[in-house]
Amino acid sequence: MTTFPESVSKSQRSSGINWRSLILPIAVILVVLFCLAPVLWQLLTSVKVNQDISAVPSVYFPRRFTLEHYQQLFARRPFWNYLLNSFFVAAASTLLALGLGAPAAYALARLRLQGERVILAGVLIVTLFPPILLFLGLLRVVQVLSLGDNYLALVLPYAAINLPLTILVMRSFFEQLPRDLEDSAKVDGYNTVGTLLNIVLPLTLPALATTGILAFITAWNEFIFALTFITRESMKTVPVAASQLGGASIFEIPYGPIAAATVLGTLPLVLLVLFFQRQIIQGLTSGAVKG
Amino acid sequence: MTQTDLKPTQAHTTNAPALEVRSLNKTFAPTVVPVKNLNLTVERGEFLTLLGPSGCGKSTVLRMIAGLEHPTKGQVLIDGEDVTRLSPSDRNIAMVFQSYALYPHMTVHDNIASGLKLRRIPKGDIEDRIRDVVDFLGLHELLNRKPGQLSGGQRQRVAVARTLVRRPSVFLLDEPLSNLDALLRENVRAELKQLFESQQAPVVYVTHDQVEAMTLSSKVAVLNEGYLQQLDTPERIYTHPANRFVAGFVGSPQMNFLTLPCDGQSVTLGNRRAPLPTEVRTDAKEITLGIRPEHVRLAREGESPTVEGTVSLVEHLGMHKLYTVQVPGKMPMTVRSLIPLSHTHSDRPIKLVFSGNAIHWFDAETGDRLNQD
């Protein structure tokens, strides 16, 4: 027993580097690189000059930088418009999903409902369908209600697609919220609405932020519905607009502007996640009960 | 700070008990009856403890008094007024929850004030009342902290402060000490006793811990499977348990129970026959003898022992040693006895004597107590 630690320390001294302590940082760097390499490629492409983009062999790390693609995006296209459209559609559908999903989740978590399991199973089954399967049905619905070129044609399906996730995540959150808190609020004199607004809601903010961000990202990135249900140029969302960027001729693919559009389309999401990160991490429930 | 400052504001002119529970029933499902036909009266200044094992319905009773559960049948009366149909906030009760249930997003001050604010009490009054309670419990430094920054004991005090500031007609406490560690629990227990002794309003306290029940209460209600087993002072519960369940549940180490053959007048204990006390009448073939380990002592020199056996286990309890003695015979028995520390045991058989006036007799089938004194 006593010889083992000594031999380790000797080998450490002889090599000078503790290899074990290096494994973790190296692994982290590799994983991050693996995940972010495509993003990095897009980012670099968006600031390369056109010559470098089409150069053979590929220029991985450009020497010359330009913001020309970004300028083109705003000069030739109403890109602000696309961003605003995306933001509005994603925000509205997220609010709708949270506004409907959170109360539903609360009811499922707190009321002893008849057939609660059946409802939950139904909610879960809905998530198993790929949205594309619902596409033709939705198209018909949009035609009948003449919702084409209307933001509602996107807001409603997005909210519906995000509802199951919202309900399931929020329900498990409500279930771990101590019931004593609500009883205590009742004894204090809060009515049901008062309890929900003053006690439950402040404690639910981290969960709302988390599910809200997931719903927002799904809505922001959605392509097929946005492509089909909206045809008017001024109402298009970022993913559709980015895919429809064209060059001067059909032979020219405008890699630079597409990359710039991708970067700009992702930026709001990154900012959003960074902004709410603290909300998510903040353990608001700590201290409610023992622990 | 005088004690009168924390007394309920309204004058009690009626002679009705502060809290009365009349034939209270709660049925969760047709087959399960957590609370069955419970009657309780609590007078002003009394400290009633609902004691029982988990799942005996004691928390359900408390929640029905609070109005958090609706009784299937029966009534709850506070100061003579039927409050069965009123919401918790209209009953003028205050409750300490097992988990304390402090609002984690509010400061200690706001936690204490929330119940008063909702009752539209003038701001100045609220601050006065909070100051009184905070002085009383020494919470000054904590007022601006959030519950997450408090220790377990501090959270408990805040939870108590939240009830005191309300000046309710009845205090309800649901296992308020179970989340504290053993040492702290003993201190807080003593503190709670002093604190609520200075209050006029009665306290209903739920616990499964018999030590808490015995030390704190002026009355103990022992519950089992939804039925009230006994309602009495802690002393009477201990010295005159109403049945075998109460006898076995209260007291540590647990009472010895010996089932003995019986012929109506006398019982057979080991190789001896002993007459039954005159007031114990039974036609059954068997009877249960109950005796607490502290009433089983070593036989003195020349004294004839009640039982004789070999020590199979010795447990040190600090003040005493607990011997588990195997008594051989036609019906082998196990008797546990508290023995002074000075005694050294050997492999030789040990002679034990049952103190005659500490013996409890129970019906072997129903478990009811048979001797009345």
Image (cartoon, coloured by chain):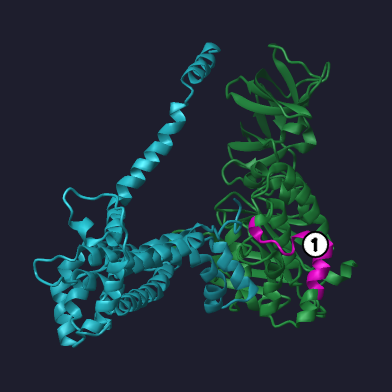
Chain colours: A cyan, B green
Callout 1: residue from which chain? B
Task: Tell me the quarter of the picture where residue A68 sits.
Answer: bottom left
In the displayed structure, A48 sits above or below B200; it is above
Asked if one can make out residue B42 in the rendered structure from this viewpoint, the answer is no
The dominant secondary structure in magenta is helix
Q: Amino acid at mark 1?
A: His
Residue on which disc 1 sits = B140
Secondary element at image label 1: helix
Q: Residues within 10 Å of mark 1 (few under 14, many from 20)?
A: some
Quadrant in the rendering for residue B106: bottom right
Stretch of the chain drawn in magenta: B128-148
**Residue A212 relative to residue B105: left or right:** left
Residue B199 colored magenta?
A: no
Q: Is B35 on the left or on the right of A146, as rendered?
A: right
Q: Nearer the viewer, residue A192 or B321?
A: A192
Nearer to me, A116 or A80: A80
Q: Is residue B59 visible?
A: yes
Is residue A291 left or right of A86 when viewed as pictured? right
Q: Quadrant of the N terminus of chain B?
A: bottom right
Work out whether residue A95 or residue B59 is closer to the camera in this orientation and state it. Answer: A95
